Amino acid sequence: MKSLEIKELKENFIETISKEWMLVTSGTRDQFNTMTASWGGIGFLWNKAVAFIFIRPERYTYEFIEQNDTLTLSFLGEDHRSIYTLCGSLSGRDTDKIKASGLIPLFTPTGNITFEQARLTLECRKLYGQFLSTESFQNREFIEKWYGEHGHLHKMYIVEIVNIWVKKSQ
Ligand SMILES: Cc1cc2nc3c(=O)[nH]c(=O)nc-3n(C[C@H](O)[C@H](O)[C@H](O)COP(=O)(O)O)c2cc1C
Protein backbone atom coordinates (compact mmCIF):
# COMPACT_ATOMS: atom_id res chain seq x y z
CA MET A 1 0.00 0.00 0.00
CA LYS A 2 1.09 3.59 -0.52
CA SER A 3 -0.15 6.62 1.35
CA LEU A 4 -2.08 9.52 -0.14
CA GLU A 5 -2.48 13.10 1.01
CA ILE A 6 -5.97 14.36 1.92
CA LYS A 7 -5.82 16.80 -1.02
CA GLU A 8 -5.42 13.85 -3.41
CA LEU A 9 -8.83 12.43 -2.43
CA LYS A 10 -11.09 13.37 -5.28
CA GLU A 11 -14.04 11.02 -5.08
CA ASN A 12 -17.67 11.64 -4.33
CA PHE A 13 -18.07 9.95 -0.95
CA ILE A 14 -21.85 10.35 -0.91
CA GLU A 15 -21.91 8.03 -3.92
CA THR A 16 -19.14 5.79 -2.64
CA ILE A 17 -20.55 5.21 0.84
CA SER A 18 -24.19 4.86 -0.19
CA LYS A 19 -23.68 2.74 -3.30
CA GLU A 20 -20.31 0.98 -3.00
CA TRP A 21 -20.44 0.69 0.81
CA MET A 22 -17.44 0.29 3.13
CA LEU A 23 -16.08 -2.02 5.79
CA VAL A 24 -15.65 -0.68 9.31
CA THR A 25 -12.90 -2.62 11.07
CA SER A 26 -11.54 -2.25 14.57
CA GLY A 27 -9.42 -4.26 16.96
CA THR A 28 -5.91 -5.58 17.20
CA ARG A 29 -3.81 -7.83 14.98
CA ASP A 30 -4.92 -10.81 17.08
CA GLN A 31 -8.55 -9.90 17.59
CA PHE A 32 -10.57 -7.68 15.31
CA ASN A 33 -13.95 -7.55 13.65
CA THR A 34 -15.32 -6.03 10.49
CA MET A 35 -18.79 -5.11 9.26
CA THR A 36 -20.37 -3.44 6.25
CA ALA A 37 -21.65 0.12 6.59
CA SER A 38 -23.43 2.41 4.16
CA TRP A 39 -24.24 5.30 6.46
CA GLY A 40 -21.66 7.94 7.22
CA GLY A 41 -19.65 10.67 5.62
CA ILE A 42 -16.40 12.51 5.20
CA GLY A 43 -15.92 16.14 6.17
CA PHE A 44 -14.01 18.81 8.04
CA LEU A 45 -14.46 19.52 11.74
CA TRP A 46 -12.31 20.99 14.49
CA ASN A 47 -9.83 21.86 11.70
CA LYS A 48 -9.34 18.19 10.94
CA ALA A 49 -10.28 15.88 8.10
CA VAL A 50 -12.85 13.60 9.66
CA ALA A 51 -15.19 10.75 8.90
CA PHE A 52 -18.40 10.03 10.75
CA ILE A 53 -20.05 6.65 11.07
CA PHE A 54 -23.17 5.32 12.78
CA ILE A 55 -23.01 1.96 14.55
CA ARG A 56 -25.84 0.20 16.35
CA PRO A 57 -24.73 -1.13 19.75
CA GLU A 58 -25.93 -4.64 18.92
CA ARG A 59 -23.13 -5.04 16.33
CA TYR A 60 -20.17 -7.14 17.45
CA THR A 61 -17.95 -4.54 15.75
CA TYR A 62 -19.34 -1.96 18.19
CA GLU A 63 -17.53 -3.73 21.04
CA PHE A 64 -14.22 -3.47 19.18
CA ILE A 65 -14.76 0.20 18.35
CA GLU A 66 -15.51 0.90 22.01
CA GLN A 67 -12.41 -0.93 23.20
CA ASN A 68 -9.96 0.59 20.73
CA ASP A 69 -8.86 4.15 19.88
CA THR A 70 -8.66 3.52 16.17
CA LEU A 71 -10.58 1.96 13.30
CA THR A 72 -10.37 1.74 9.53
CA LEU A 73 -12.82 2.38 6.73
CA SER A 74 -12.01 0.09 3.81
CA PHE A 75 -13.45 0.58 0.35
CA LEU A 76 -13.32 -2.61 -1.68
CA GLY A 77 -14.87 -1.48 -4.94
CA GLU A 78 -17.77 -2.91 -6.89
CA ASP A 79 -15.95 -6.18 -7.61
CA HIS A 80 -16.32 -7.28 -4.02
CA ARG A 81 -20.07 -6.96 -3.53
CA SER A 82 -20.28 -10.53 -2.19
CA ILE A 83 -17.80 -9.70 0.61
CA TYR A 84 -19.85 -6.67 1.60
CA THR A 85 -23.05 -8.71 1.57
CA LEU A 86 -21.53 -11.38 3.78
CA CYS A 87 -19.95 -8.92 6.24
CA GLY A 88 -23.24 -7.03 6.42
CA SER A 89 -25.44 -10.03 7.10
CA LEU A 90 -23.42 -12.31 9.38
CA SER A 91 -22.03 -11.46 12.79
CA GLY A 92 -18.45 -12.05 13.88
CA ARG A 93 -19.99 -13.33 17.10
CA ASP A 94 -20.89 -16.62 15.43
CA THR A 95 -19.01 -16.69 12.11
CA ASP A 96 -15.38 -16.25 11.16
CA LYS A 97 -16.19 -13.62 8.53
CA ILE A 98 -12.58 -13.32 7.40
CA LYS A 99 -12.44 -17.00 6.54
CA ALA A 100 -15.94 -17.09 5.07
CA SER A 101 -15.42 -14.00 2.89
CA GLY A 102 -11.87 -14.65 1.73
CA LEU A 103 -10.78 -11.25 3.04
CA ILE A 104 -7.00 -11.08 3.40
CA PRO A 105 -5.98 -8.89 6.36
CA LEU A 106 -3.23 -6.32 5.93
CA PHE A 107 -1.77 -4.30 8.75
CA THR A 108 -0.78 -0.64 8.61
CA PRO A 109 2.56 0.37 10.14
CA THR A 110 0.72 1.28 13.36
CA GLY A 111 -1.10 -2.06 13.45
CA ASN A 112 -4.53 -1.10 12.16
CA ILE A 113 -6.32 -3.60 10.00
CA THR A 114 -7.39 -3.36 6.39
CA PHE A 115 -7.59 -5.90 3.59
CA GLU A 116 -5.71 -6.79 0.44
CA GLN A 117 -8.99 -6.35 -1.47
CA ALA A 118 -9.33 -2.68 -0.42
CA ARG A 119 -8.77 -0.11 -3.17
CA LEU A 120 -8.80 2.66 -0.53
CA THR A 121 -8.45 2.66 3.25
CA LEU A 122 -9.01 5.54 5.64
CA GLU A 123 -7.12 4.93 8.88
CA CYS A 124 -8.89 6.79 11.64
CA ARG A 125 -8.62 7.79 15.29
CA LYS A 126 -11.73 8.30 17.42
CA LEU A 127 -12.43 11.90 18.44
CA TYR A 128 -16.03 11.79 19.59
CA GLY A 129 -18.76 9.24 20.23
CA GLN A 130 -22.37 9.85 21.17
CA PHE A 131 -25.61 7.93 20.95
CA LEU A 132 -28.36 9.51 18.91
CA SER A 133 -31.33 10.37 21.11
CA THR A 134 -35.02 10.25 20.19
CA GLU A 135 -35.61 13.73 21.66
CA SER A 136 -33.08 15.24 19.24
CA PHE A 137 -34.83 14.11 16.07
CA GLN A 138 -36.18 17.12 14.19
CA ASN A 139 -38.01 14.82 11.82
CA ARG A 140 -39.98 12.63 14.24
CA GLU A 141 -40.96 10.19 11.47
CA PHE A 142 -37.41 8.88 11.35
CA ILE A 143 -37.71 7.44 14.88
CA GLU A 144 -40.41 5.03 13.78
CA LYS A 145 -38.86 4.50 10.35
CA TRP A 146 -35.34 3.59 11.44
CA TYR A 147 -35.56 2.49 15.09
CA GLY A 148 -37.94 0.62 17.38
CA GLU A 149 -38.31 -2.78 15.80
CA HIS A 150 -35.34 -2.10 13.46
CA GLY A 151 -32.83 -1.89 16.31
CA HIS A 152 -31.33 0.44 18.88
CA LEU A 153 -30.36 4.02 18.22
CA HIS A 154 -26.97 4.31 16.55
CA LYS A 155 -23.87 5.59 18.22
CA MET A 156 -22.26 8.26 16.07
CA TYR A 157 -18.48 8.32 15.99
CA ILE A 158 -16.53 11.23 14.60
CA VAL A 159 -13.07 10.04 13.73
CA GLU A 160 -9.99 11.87 12.50
CA ILE A 161 -8.57 10.58 9.23
CA VAL A 162 -4.91 10.07 10.13
CA ASN A 163 -3.74 8.12 7.07
CA ILE A 164 -5.04 7.29 3.64
CA TRP A 165 -3.87 4.12 1.92
CA VAL A 166 -4.35 2.95 -1.65
CA LYS A 167 -3.10 -0.06 -3.55
CA LYS A 168 0.44 0.44 -4.88
CA SER A 169 -0.74 -0.14 -8.44
CA GLN A 170 -3.24 2.81 -8.31
C1 LIG B 1 -25.37 -2.41 2.91
C2 LIG B 1 -25.32 -2.50 4.39
C3 LIG B 1 -25.07 -1.35 5.13
C4 LIG B 1 -25.03 -1.39 6.53
N1 LIG B 1 -24.76 -0.23 7.22
C5 LIG B 1 -24.72 -0.26 8.57
C6 LIG B 1 -24.39 0.94 9.30
O1 LIG B 1 -24.08 2.00 8.73
N2 LIG B 1 -24.43 0.86 10.66
C7 LIG B 1 -24.73 -0.30 11.32
O2 LIG B 1 -24.74 -0.32 12.56
N3 LIG B 1 -25.01 -1.46 10.66
C8 LIG B 1 -24.98 -1.47 9.30
N4 LIG B 1 -25.23 -2.62 8.61
C9 LIG B 1 -25.48 -3.87 9.34
C10 LIG B 1 -24.20 -4.61 9.75
O3 LIG B 1 -23.24 -4.64 8.71
C11 LIG B 1 -24.58 -6.07 10.12
O4 LIG B 1 -25.51 -6.08 11.17
C12 LIG B 1 -23.39 -6.95 10.43
O5 LIG B 1 -23.80 -8.30 10.34
C13 LIG B 1 -22.78 -6.67 11.80
O6 LIG B 1 -21.72 -7.55 11.98
P1 LIG B 1 -21.01 -7.77 13.40
O7 LIG B 1 -22.06 -8.24 14.36
O8 LIG B 1 -19.95 -8.81 13.11
O9 LIG B 1 -20.43 -6.45 13.78
C14 LIG B 1 -25.25 -2.61 7.21
C15 LIG B 1 -25.52 -3.77 6.47
C16 LIG B 1 -25.53 -3.73 5.08
C17 LIG B 1 -25.79 -4.98 4.29
Image (cartoon, helix red, strand yellow):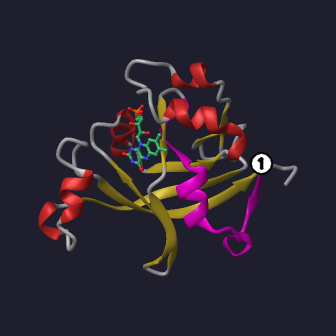
Relative placement, left or right, of 14 versus 103 is left
Camera-side residue of 22 and 142: 142
Farthest residue, direction left: 135
Relative placement, left or right, of 146 versus 76 is left
The residue indicated by pointer 1 is: 1
Q: Residue at x 24, y 42 (%)?
A: 151
Position in image of residue 41 (x %, y %): 49, 65
Farthest residue, direction right: 169
Position in image of residue 83 (x %, y %): 60, 33
- Does residue 50 appear in the picture of this structure? no
Q: Quadrant of the C terminus?
A: bottom right
* Amino acid type for the residue under numbered disc 1: Met
93 falls in the magenta region: no
Magenta range is: 1-29
Position in image of residue 109 (x %, y %): 67, 46
Judged from the image, the quadrant occupied by ligand 1 is top left
17 falls in the magenta region: yes
Instruction: From this view, report whether residue 66 is shown above or below residue 165.
Output: above
Picture quadrant where residue 106 is located: top right
Position in image of residue 31 (x %, y %): 48, 28
Q: Residue at x 47, y 50 (%)?
A: 70
Camera-side residue of 46 and 91: 91
Q: Residue at x 28, y 37 (%)?
A: 58
Relative placement, left or right, of 11 versus 157 is right
Instruction: From this view, report whether residue 150 is shown above or below residue 29.
Output: below
- Does residue 78 appear in the picture of this structure? yes
Pointer 1 local density, CA inside 10 Å: few below 14, some 14–19, many at least 20? some
Q: How many marks?
A: 1
